[in-house]
Amino acid sequence: MPRALILGGTGLVGRATALRLLKAGWQVDVTGRNPAHMPPELSALGGEFRAVDRADSTALRAAVGEGTDLLVDCLCFTTADTRSLLPLAAHATSTVLISSRAVYIDAAGNHVNSSTPPHFSGPISETHPTMAPRDDIDYRSREGYGANKVAAEQVAWESGLPISVLRPSQIHGVGASPAREWAVVKRVLDDRTALLLADRGAGVVHTSAAANLAALIETVAERPGNRVLNCADPDAPSALEICRAIAGHFGHEWEEVLLDDTAPAGLGRTPWDSPHPIVLDTSAATALGYRPAGTYATTIAPALDRLVEAARNGQPPVDDGYFAEYLDYAAEDAFLAGRGGRSGR
């Protein structure tokens, strides 16, 4: 029985990966700081929780033990994180480091966290230019996140160890935080009869299902190597297509009001807006043998059902202001009334 150790295994990517591997007959250990966060579906399949802090190198080494077939790090953000990972990777047949599409820059040096949105000329391959590596600024800042990821990647690359760096884009699935789909699911639960979409809902930001990341992780576990791979859903749906997929999942119908640039600023915003498409080229992963678990619509279904279940149990996603701009019903109703239409209710 092959063994996998997943650092940060109770989170979005870790739980999806553990679930896939357990169903495939792997022995899976996941680390975390709070056993209460262990997903029950993992325990039910035989997954083991290890109370280990990612910063505790001694505890991590003990968790690896004599070695492991697969080591997955979902919590690597800085060069220090990667350096602490290398001694563990030396005892693993294959290691995976989760990075991000945030590392890429356009011809003007803009990235997804820039004040000016990036404009990529086409699908982004792994050889596309990235931000300059930096480890002297906070990785939690807009400028620091991608730059620290690049620096962390370089340490992994230079080690020569069989570490696969995966770059996903807007990861979704059960356990996502924020769960972007809540901006649409809540509208369904509130029985809104109109959906307003800025820029006619044409924005495209490639999505990555945690289930598809898990599929790629299983692929590289069987084909160890020192490499970088993009990972995204096989389709790249627009904001309009995403909203239709979510509404369709629940059988909900509403009027689609596709706004142009004459509409009030900020009206009809969604978490998937972008003035220019952001699409990852995943041909390198496909050539390696990766086969996605499904499209956006098929892989998002379990997360949608979990959101509804949580809301009905009085535990909707924590709203710390993230969703406010996407759920301004008063502004929407005022606009609809002004054009002589009904309110969104």
Image (spheres, rainbow, N blue to C red):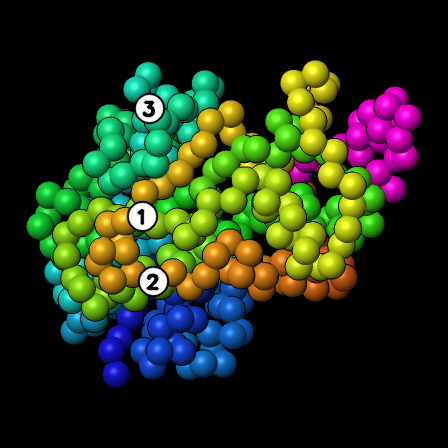
Classify 56 as above or below 335.
below
Instruction: Please name the residue that numbered disc 3 is placed on.
Output: 106
The magenta stretch spans residue 331: yes
Circle 1 sits in a helix, a strand or a loop, which is it? loop
Q: Which residues are magenta?
A: 320-345
Instruction: Please name the residue that numbered disc 1 is placed on.
Output: 282
Question: Which quadrant: the N terminus?
Answer: bottom left
Instruction: Please name the residue that numbered disc 2 is placed on.
Output: 291
The magenta stretch spans residue 7: no
Q: Residue at x 63, y 58 (%)?
A: 304
Task: Report x, y in % for residue 211.
Answer: 44, 61
- Assess disc 2: are there few (<14), some (14-19) or many (≥20) residues with their C-alpha within 10 Å of its C-alpha: some
Q: Residue at x 18, y 64 (%)?
A: 223
Q: Earlier in the sequence, mark 2 or mark 3?
A: 3
Q: Nearer the viewer, mark 3 or mark 1?
A: 1
- Assess disc 3: are there few (<14), some (14-19) or many (≥20) residues with their C-alpha within 10 Å of its C-alpha: some
Task: Report x, y in % for residue 289.
Answer: 25, 62
Where, by quadrant of the figure, is residue 48 drawn? Answer: bottom left
CA gap between label 1 and label 2 equals 11 Å
Q: What residue type is disc 1 on?
A: Thr
Classify 72 as above or below 242.
below
Circle 2 sits in a helix, a strand or a loop, which is it? loop
Disc 2 + disc 3, Cβ < 8 Å: no
- Assess disc 1: are there few (<14), some (14-19) or many (≥20) residues with their C-alpha within 10 Å of its C-alpha: many
